[in-house]
Image: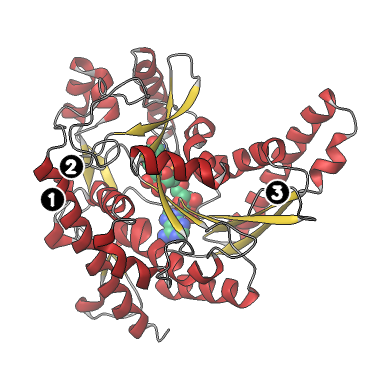
Amino acid sequence: MEGSDDEQQSVYTVLVTGANSGLGFSTCCRLIDEFLFTRPQTQSLHLLITTRSASKNKDTQSRLQQHLQKTLHKADKSTPGISKVLASRIAISGEQVDLCNLRSVKELGERLVNKGQRLDVLICNAGIGGWKGLNWPSAIWSMMTDWKHSCTYPTYKLGFVGSVAPQGNEDKQQQLGEVFTANVFGHYLLAHWLAPLMKADVSNDPGRIIWISSIEAYAHAFDADDLQALTSDAAYESSKRLTDLLVLTSELPSTATSTAAFLDESDDGQKPKMYLAHPGVCATSIADLPLVLWYAMLFAQYVARWLGSPWHPVSSYLGAVSSVWLSLAPFSTLSNQETTDGKAKWASSTDVFGNERVVRTEVGGWGWGGKVGEKADGKMRLSANRWRGQEDVTKESREEFEVLGQRVWREMEDLRRTWEKRLRV
Ligand SMILES: NC(=O)c1ccc[n+]([C@@H]2O[C@H](COP(=O)([O-])OP(=O)(O)OC[C@H]3O[C@@H](n4cnc5c(N)ncnc54)[C@H](OP(=O)(O)O)[C@@H]3O)[C@@H](O)[C@H]2O)c1
């Protein structure tokens, strides 16, 4: 199994999409740092990054090399000469993909499958907000009257309605929602095509597909009759709720037929596992603000943390703690956590001083682990800072969540098959 010391030299490969900025870049830095000091010397990390262009790829690889050099330099200070051993344990390579262009996703899948190298972790990080601006009066009013809550659960963002990701044809039937495709469907196809590289075998635990959600994945933002949120002005929130539904129901018997087809494997012990993470709120370029406003946002986020919000890591390096933990923690640790307390949405959280930790997040209709009657207790389940519209999980809401999960799994599988035919996979 991965992590065993009796192997000669083993390679642990992690693919991160959208690695050139924000959380994607910080996730890569953090993976390097934690891998070097938590995994045995017999293991090397192959960090496979994706960006949308060759120039971004080159630039990202060079910035990651600089980060590695800094880490090695620090290590040398405490143990002179160790950097040579450590440096040989990290390899970085790059691929290009535009998740909104399904042909490009298919080509990446084919390239990697043809290479045949095992993939241990796929981090579905890339994403877009699809916002056109802010409702300023509402933003100012809610910030002044309810700072912490409105910085965590903003109600003043204005989203584009009906934006589509062109796939090289004019047929309306074949149009896909842009935010849906960038955040969910592009990754969904990629994960399906890469699943054969991620199965458990005699020397490896199942691969991990880590989906990045958000604290803003409200139940009310998702309409099952509009899977792609084409008629909604909250396409981002809808895409994140869809992500929550897919991942949290992915191990239930009721979705097994769909997940077996999606992961190309019906044996639960062999199937790659899906995990759900969110970074809290971090200052990145996803909101696409002018510089002055970006600094105002940064300040607002720090104030929210000082007012006691656990959901404001602010720094993307701190925000990456949950996805990196899910990538590198021993498989048995994750299995124990999710078997004992239920499948979770794992969040990056900090205290007022910025001390990080990974905690479970409450999800509408599912709670902290899909259990009815579960209460926030000492196990770092933070209910004081829940969204004010959140209700406790009841037997009915838990059932509705599962039924909705089954439905979205079926519809995503139908959409996958339709697009595989169109793309002639
Ligand atoms: N920042 C937060 O507070 C926050 C909170 C919750 C969840 N998240 C999630 O974290 C993830 C990363 O966001 P971020 O805040 O780090 O934003 P970011 O700095 O804007 O990074 C987004 C990354 O995704 C890439 N990307 C966008 N569209 C793509 C496409 N069609 N194909 C391939 N790559 C694409 C971008 O590439 P380009 O540079 O080429 O555009 C960029 O590398 C997203 O899934 C986001 O929803 C962020």
Ligand 1 neighbours mark 1 (CB distance < 8 Å): no
Q: How many marks?
A: 3
**Location of mark 2 (residue):** 365
**Element type at marker 1?**
helix
Q: Nearer the viewer, mark 3 or mark 1?
A: 1
Q: Residue at x 79, y 30 (%)?
A: 75
Spatial CA span between label 2 and label 3: 44 Å
Q: Residue furthest left?
A: 396
Q: Nearer the viewer, residue 353 or 340?
A: 340
**Location of mark 1 (residue):** 400
Q: Residue at x 48, y 68 (%)?
A: 195
Image disc number at residue 62: 3
Residues tagged 3 and 1 counted as in contact (Cβ below 8 A): no
Q: Nearer the viewer, residue 401 or 282?
A: 401
- Asked if 149 appears above or below 407 in the picture, the reply is above
Q: Nearer the viewer, mark 2 or mark 3?
A: 2
